[in-house]
Image: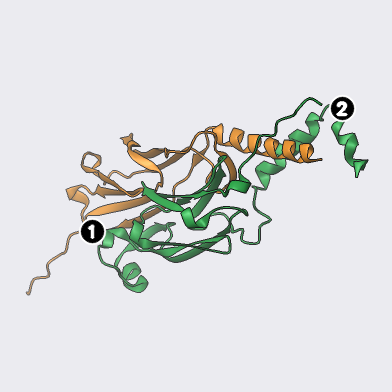
Amino acid sequence: MFSDLWRLTGPRTPELDWLRDMLDGVFPAGLNDIRAVPRGSFPQINMGHTDDALHVYVFAAGLKPGDLELSVQNNVLTVSGARHDSSDGEVQSEGARSERRSYFRQERFSGEFSRSIALPEGVDTERAEAHCRDGIVEIRLPKSEKMKPRHIEVHAS
Amino acid sequence: MNEVTRQNQQNRDVATTRQANEQRTLLPAVDIYEEDEALHVIADMPGVHRDALHIEVNDNVLTLEGEIGFDMPEGIAASYAEVQGQKFSRRFTLSQEIDSEAIRAELRDGVVNLVLPKRDTHRRRRIEIQAA
């Protein structure tokens, strides 16, 4: 069990930190996840945590609250919905749209989407709440009591 | 042992935050299409508020810039980030046919809608065929 104790002695090598920094830059965190997606998937998702909650940010430009469906099952958060061309006014079929207009670039996502992301253990999905502003949907999932960091007092013996 | 894991975890967090603090510029996805009287540019810029959006035309170059600003709680640590940057920026060169004075822009739910009208002299005209 204590065979790892050598790691605690001596200074940490800066070279190793540098290497890890570099690799973190090349391979973004979460790439190994089974639900990892290639770059440019829609919508993009950022996740962060504070001491008492997990915050998920969905970068869903052009979506109104009604266009987006959020669901949580077994600690997997699923974001689904559809985005259609907003300037059209009414929803048109893909064929009619491209026929009418000559596009020089068409990089923006259009159509139906569904993305899932695994949440860490111990979030209280019952008390989750979501807000939408400027094309970003923020989902706040409170951590359950046992997952919050606890301060441990050290008593002199 | 736990101490070591904890330290690594903290280091990882610091690394992600430091990356985010650098000014990284993202390229917004755009759609560009042409109609008879105007060119249309639609750009996805989620998180950009009206006040943080700058659109300018200088020397026939159209610049589209926006700072991403959304409220994040104090002391948040990133655990996963697909969007790494604070700013969207993209430039396009316009041709002479665009009437830069008459460009209109609209921002709704993080989507910028630009209409670049063509000058009257460059509009497509239907040519009447007269019976001889």
Q: Residue furthest right?
A: A3
Tell me the quarter of the picture where residue A109 sits. bottom left
Q: Compared to B126, does B112 lie above or below?
A: above
Find disc 1 in the rendering and name its residue.
B36
Residue drawn at 26 percent across, 49 percent down = B115
Residue drawn at 30 percent across, 59 percent down = A86
Quadrant containing the C terminus of chain A in the rendered view? top right
Q: How far from the left and from the top, in percent, is residue B1?
A: 82, 40
Tell me the quarter of the picture where residue A26 sits. top right
Q: How is the image coloured?
A: by chain
Q: Compared to A132, does B89 lie above or below?
A: above
Find disc 2 in the rendering and name its residue.
A10
B12 vs B35, nearest the viewer:
B12
In terms of secondary structure, where does tag 1 sit?
loop
Identify the chain drawn in green.
A
Q: Is residue B44 left or right of residue B80?
A: left
Q: Tell me the colour chain B is drawn in.
A: orange
In terms of secondary structure, where does tag 2 sit?
loop
Protein chain holding label 2? A
Q: Residue furthest front?
A: A157
Protein chain holding label 1? B
Check if mark 1 and mark 2 are on a common chain: no
Please count the marks in the image. Answer: 2
